[in-house]
C-alpha cells in the first residue's frame, strides 16, 4: 500500500477522509477524488470547498469567490470530479487537465486514474 501514496502524510489524510465520509473501501470513484485531494497540500487545506462529507457530494468550488485555485489545482479538481461522477466542463480534456501539472501532481493524477479503473489497486489502498 505504501508505494501508492506520495508520503506518509498523504496516506494518513486519505484514510482520515475515508473515515470522515464513512466511505466503502470499494468505492473507487470516491477514492480517486480523495486520493487527489489528500495528495496535494493546497487542495487538502481547501478540501471543505471541494467535497462535503456530511452530504457526501462534491461542491461547485471552481467559480467560488471565497477560495482561489491555481490553474493546476483547478485541473486536479476537474480530474477528481470527472473520476468521481463523470462531471465535466469545457476544460475537462486530457490536454487541459494534465498539460499544466508538475511532476508531483502528474504522478498524483496518474495514480488517481489507476485507482478509479483498477479495483486491485484500490484494494491495496483500502487495507
Image (cartoon, rainbow, N blue to C red):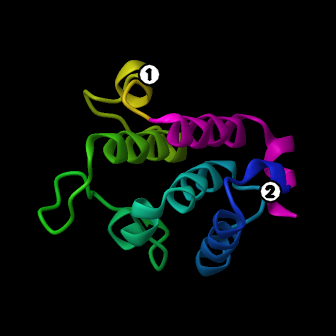
Judged from this view, the residue extending furthest toward the left is 65
- Magenta-span inclusion, residue 82: no
Q: Marks 2 and 1: CB-CB under 8 Å?
A: no
Q: Position of residue 85 (x, y in %)?
A: 49, 45
Q: Which residue is mark 1?
A: 94
Q: Which residue is mark 2?
A: 125
x 86%, y 53%: residue: 124
Mark count = 2
| Disc 1: CA contacts within 10 A as few (<14), some (14-19) or many (>=20) | few
x 17%, y 53%: residue: 63
Q: Which residues are magenta?
A: 102-127
* 104 relative position to 92: left or right: right
* 96 relative position to 126: left or right: left
Q: Secondary structure at mark 1?
A: helix
Residue 91: image quadrant is top left
Q: Main secondary structure of the magenta part?
A: helix
Q: Position of residue 45 (x, y in %)?
A: 40, 71
Q: Position of residue 68 (x, y in %)?
A: 21, 59
Q: Position of residue 20 (x, y in %)?
A: 60, 80
x 69%, y 49%: residue: 28
- Observer-nearest residue: 14 or 58? 14
Q: Is residue 48 above or below residue 115?
A: below
Residue 61: image quadrant is bottom left
- Magenta-span inclusion, residue 126: yes
x 50%, y 58%: residue: 37
Q: Quadrant of the C terminus?
A: bottom right
| Res. 40 mark | none
Measure how far apart labels 2 and 1 are at the Cα level. Answer: 25 Å
| Disc 2: CA contacts within 10 A as few (<14), some (14-19) or many (>=20) | many
Tell me which label, 2 or 1, sits earlier in the chain.
1
Amino acid at each position: 500500500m505504501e508505494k501508492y501514496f506520495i508520503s506518509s502524510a498523504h496516506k494518513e489524510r486519505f484514510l482520515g477522509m475515508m473515515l470522515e465520509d464513512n466511505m466503502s473501501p470499494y468505492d473507487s470513484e470516491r477514492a480517486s477524488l480523495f486520493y487527489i485531494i489528500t495528495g496535494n497540500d493546497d487542495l487538502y487545506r481547501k478540501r471543505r470547498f471541494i467535497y462535503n462529507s456530511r452530504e457526501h457530494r462534491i461542491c461547485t468550488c471552481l467559480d467560488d469567490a471565497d477560495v482561489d485555485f491555481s490553474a493546476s489545482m483547478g485541473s486536479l479538481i476537474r480530474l477528481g470530479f470527472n473520476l468521481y461522477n463523470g462531471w465535466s466542463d469545457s476544460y475537462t480534456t486530457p490536454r487541459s487537465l494534465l498539460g499544466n501539472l508538475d511532476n508531483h501532481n502528474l504522478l498524483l493524477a496518474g495514480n488517481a486514474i489507476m485507482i478509479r479503473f483498477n479495483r486491485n489497486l484500490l484494494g491495496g489502498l483500502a487495507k
